[in-house]
Amino acid sequence: MSTRELIEIYHHAWTSGDFSTARACLADNLDFKGSIDTFHTADEFMAALKKFQSMLRGVKLLKNFFAQDGAALLYDCDSPAGLIRTAEFFTAKGGKISEIRLVFDASELRKLMQP
């Protein structure tokens, strides 16, 4: 499978709620760093991703760029905090996503997450 196919399958899976397919795309020792959280395993990351996805009304992919060992996606998440413009950068190794860097303005989302 090409890196492009891997990333496209992963993105479609998590945005549609198919978490078993999304998890299968990730290396066990996934290195994730985002605007709110950092995770060092795919299972930790998936727990947070499930929560995030459950609050979304939709995701609209705007742009994508692919290389042999990675990709970048730009998309909007329609959330209770409004539209969240998101840039996601991937590194792929051995047919799995090994690293994700997720960049977005988290200020409105943080307000919703406060107790």
Image (cartoon, rainbow, N blue to C red):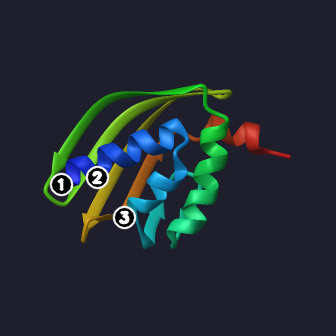
Find residue 19 and report its horizontal and vertical position in percent: 53, 51
Report whether 73 appears left or right of 48. Answer: left
Report whether 31 appears left or right of 5. Answer: right
Q: Which residue is mark 2?
A: 6
Q: Which quarter of the figure is the N terminus placed in?
A: bottom left
Residue in the foreground of this view, choosing between 79 and 95 = 95
> Is 59 rendered above or below residue 52?
above
SS label for mark 3: strand
Amino acid under label 2?
Leu
Front: mark 3 or 1:
1
SS label for mark 1: loop
Amino acid under label 3?
Glu
Residue 28 falls in which quadrant of the image?
Answer: bottom left
Residue contact at pointers 3 and 2, CB within 8 angstroms:
no
Residue in the foreground of this view, choosing between 101 and 6 = 6
Residue in the foreground of this view, choosing between 75 and 110 = 75
Report how far apart the C-alphas of labels 3 and 1 lie in the structure.
16 Å
Q: Residues within 10 Å of mark 2 (few under 14, many from 20)?
A: many
Residue in the foreground of this view, choosing between 109 and 29 = 29
> Is 109 rendered above or below residue 27?
above
Front: mark 3 or 2:
2
Looking at marks 3 and 2 on the same chain, the residue that comes earlier in the sequence is marked by: 2
Residue contact at pointers 1 and 2, CB within 8 angstroms:
yes
Report how far apart the C-alphas of labels 3 and 2 lie in the structure.
13 Å
> Is 24 rendered above or below residue 57?
below
Q: Which residue is mark 3?
A: 99
Q: Which residue is mark 1?
A: 2
Find residue 104 and report its horizontal and vertical position in percent: 48, 41
